[in-house]
């Protein structure tokens, strides 16, 4: 599927035969991308058989597909693809019979629906991209926090001579540690933790393993 609609000058230079060919290719590519198990010739036969039905029901539309796909019930995308295909096939049939004036409105309707399909696809891809980026951002954030936690643990395991004193002084000493500041800067985590002192406090006071380490390395005086 093309990323951008054709320019007006490009359309102006095309004959209806060329437009039919390009429309057919676009629809074939949409079919291949979204319903790869379907044969283009088979689905064309199924769809054109409904050309003379006045009120086409969803059950008849869905039967044009031979396989089951993971998609929403009564998919708007599938519905609009069906009609884009139907109008294209009607235009193609009219053209082959020399009914050029009849072919044009069919082709116009098909082009309008293809525009919807392209817009729908773009919107979905944009949503997936944003969701993926948000997910990746969340994972990166958690990874940075885990690295900072690990660094706090390492600093806690390296007490000053004589051991750690009170919890508050231990927290303040680790908070002012140049090693910790440089480490946070090196992994780009300056904005990851809003309140670093609170973060360190939580790690030393509430983390059972770190609390056990602190008690072992606490000054005996």
Image (tube, helix red, strand yellow):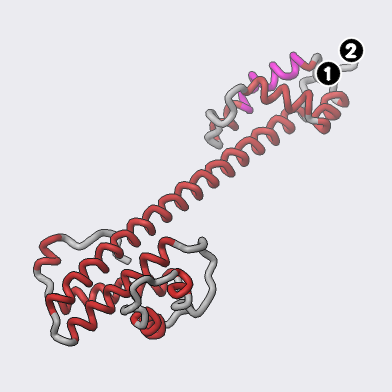
**As rendered, which of 37 and 211 lies closer to the eye?**
37
Q: Secondary structure at mark 1?
A: loop
**As rendered, which of 37 and 83 lies closer to the eye?**
83
Q: Are marks 2 and 1 in contact (CB under 8 Å)?
A: yes
Q: Position of residue 109 (x, y in %)?
A: 24, 66
Q: Quadrant of residue 194?
A: top right
Residue to which mark 2 is pinned: 221
Q: Quadrant of the N terminus?
A: bottom left
Main SS, magenta region, reads helix
Q: Residue at x 65, y 38 (%)?
A: 147
Near mark 2 (Cα within 10 A), the count class, few <14, some 14-19 or many ≥20, is few
Q: Is residue 69 above or below residue 217?
A: below
Q: Specify whether residue 169 is painted magenta.
A: yes
Q: Left or right of 43: which side holds 19?
A: left
Q: Specify whether residue 132 is painted magenta.
A: no
Magenta-colored span: 168-180
Q: Quadrant of residue 157?
A: top right
Q: Secondary structure at mark 2?
A: loop
Q: Quadrant of the C terminus?
A: top right
Residue 151, labelled with which disc? none
**As rendered, which of 147 and 81 lies closer to the eye?**
81
Q: Residue at x 9, y 70 (%)?
A: 13
Q: Residue furthest bottom?
A: 97
Residue to which mark 1 is pinned: 162
Q: Position of residue 191 (x, y in %)?
A: 53, 29
Q: Residue at x 69, y 24 (%)?
A: 200
Q: Left or right of 151: which side holds 67?
A: left
Q: Position of residue 71 (x, y in %)?
A: 51, 64
Q: Left or right of 165: which side holds 193?
A: left
Q: Residue furthest top?
A: 221
Q: Position of residue 130 (x, y in %)?
A: 46, 47
């Amino acid at each position: 599927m093309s990323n951008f609609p054709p320019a007006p000058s490009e359309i102006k230079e095309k004959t209806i035969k060329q437009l039919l060919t390009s429309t057919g290719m676009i629809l074939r590519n949409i079919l291949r991308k979204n319903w790869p198990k379907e044969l283009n010739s088979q689905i064309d036969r199924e769809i054109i058989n409904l050309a003379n039905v006045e009120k086409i029901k969803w059950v008849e539309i869905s039967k044009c597909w031979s396989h089951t796909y993971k998609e929403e019930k009564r998919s708007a995308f599938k519905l609009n693809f069906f009609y884009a295909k139907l109008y294209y096939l009607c235009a193609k049939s009219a053209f082959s019979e020399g009914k050029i004036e009849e072919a044009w409105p069919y082709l116009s309707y098909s082009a309008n629906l293809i525009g919807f399909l392209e817009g729908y696809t773009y919107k979905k891809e944009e949503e997936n991209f944003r969701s993926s980026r948000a997910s990746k951002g969340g994972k990166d954030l958690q990874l940075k926090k885990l690295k900072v936690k690990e660094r706090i643990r390492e600093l806690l395991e390296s007490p000053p001579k004589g051991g750690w004193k009170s919890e508050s002084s231990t927290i303040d000493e680790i908070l002012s540690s140049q090693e910790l500041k440089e480490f946070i800067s090196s992994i780009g985590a300056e904005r990851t933790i809003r309140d670093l002192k609170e973060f360190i406090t939580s790690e030393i006071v509430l983390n059972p393993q770190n609390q056990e380490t602190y008690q072992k390395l606490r000054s005996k005086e």
